[in-house]
Amino acid sequence: MDEQIKIAEERREARNLRDRLARQVLQLHPDIKEDPDGFPIDLDWIPVGTTEAAIRSLARHYAKQKLIRRILNERKEAQGDV
């Protein structure tokens, strides 16, 4: 049981590190968020500890959140106009 807990903690720490590094890449190259699947990512941008897939996945998440916010704002404005 203790070993399983240790393994789970190590996985969580690795996942947190991977995501933190991916967020750093997106801060340096915010254009990736505009076209997560089509924007060319230079392999030199990817630090050890994260992956291109993690960067693109996080960029897709940010793009989806931006779209949701835009739709909600449009609905709010439309309701105010009625």
Image: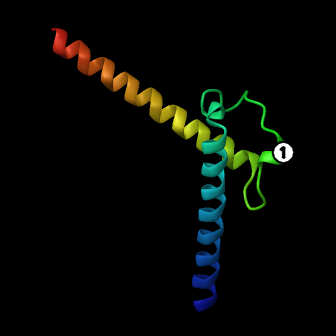
Q: Position of residue 28 (x, y in %)?
A: 65, 43
Left or right: residue 37 compared with residue 67: right
What residue is drawn where x is 66% and y is 59%?
A: 18
Q: Nearer the viewer, residue 2 or 18?
A: 18
In the rendering, at what x and y percent does residue 31 appear? 64, 30
In the visual, does 53 lie left or right of 43? left
**Residue for point 18% across, 9% down:** 81
Residue found at x 25% / y 16% = 77
Taking 7 as reference, is 75 above or below it? above
- 73 left or right of 34 in image: left
| Quadrant assignment, res 48 | bottom right
17 or 12, nearer to the observer: 17
Which residue ends up furthest to the front in the rendered image?
A: 28
Quadrant of the drawing holding the N terminus = bottom right
In the picture of the structure, the residue carrying the numbered disc 1 is 43
Tell me what residue is drawn at x 50 percent, y 33 percent: 64
Q: How many marks?
A: 1
Q: Secondary structure at mark 1?
A: helix
Vertical position of residue 76 compared to residue 8: above or below: above
Q: Which quadrant of the rendered structure holds the C terminus?
A: top left
Q: Could you tell me the amino acid type at mark 1?
A: Leu
Q: Residues within 10 Å of mark 1 (few under 14, many from 20)?
A: few
